[in-house]
Amino acid sequence: MTALVDTNAAPAGLARRFAAFLYEGVLLFGVVFFAGFLYSVLTRQQHALEGRTGMAVSLFTVLGLYFVGFWTRSGQTLAMKTWHLRVTDAAGRPLGWGRALLRYCLSWLWFLPALISVWALGLHGGGAIIGSLLAGIAGYLLIARLHPQRQFLHDALCGSRVITQLPVRS
């Protein structure tokens, strides 16, 4: 039986969610490093430019398993636990596999416009790529400010929401 969360719980603030986003990036560095290393060893990759597509697909899959696994189990990744955030469906229940997978795929909207612009403009310099990604992230944050409940686009599209869930003090 799944425990229900208060459906009237206020959505988490943008600052708290963005802080969790940044912290998640720090934690995922280790996950991506290990998965990339394992891929390189198993495929006997000799050069970084060889097998880029396979590496990208494997990292996308590993990250998907990480997020979908945590969201369906407890509604919280490690960073979300630290920042007292939980992802639920509109009724306050934990996400099912289908909705969690949809949320994961749609969450790439954070980066997709920036990645498309980098590709379309043929940018190759690190500064230009990072600038484009930062502009895309800032734009995504601004779009959330337009939503009545300050939801990110991927949550609004897939029917999920992120709430603040502070620990119960006894």
Image (cartoon, rainbow, N blue to C red):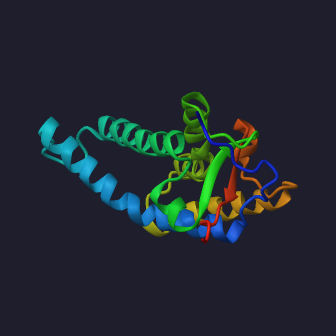
Residue at the spot x=25%, y=46% of the render? Answer: 49
The foreground one among 64 and 129 is 64
Q: Residue furthest top?
A: 98
Would residue 100 be found to the left or right of residue 9 on screen? Answer: left
Can the viewer see residue 128 in this picture? no
**Rendering coords of residue 162 (x, y %):** 68, 53
Q: Quarter of the image holding residue 135?
A: bottom right
**Rendering coords of residue 50 (x, y %):** 23, 41
Counting labels gives 0
Residue at the spot x=58%, y=28% of the render? Answer: 98
Can the viewer see residue 103 in this picture? yes
Would residue 165 be found to the left or right of residue 126 on screen? Answer: right
Q: Residue furthest front?
A: 170
The foreground one among 132 and 7 is 7
**Rendering coords of residue 129 (x, y %):** 50, 61
Q: Quadrant of the C terminus?
A: bottom right
Residue at the spot x=57%, y=45% of the render? Answer: 108
**Rendering coords of residue 118 (x, y %):** 54, 52
Q: Quadrant of the N terminus?
A: top right
The foreground one among 97 and 142 is 97
Q: Quarter of the image holding residue 26?
A: bottom left
- Residue 129, placed above or below residue 1: below
Q: Residue furthest right?
A: 148
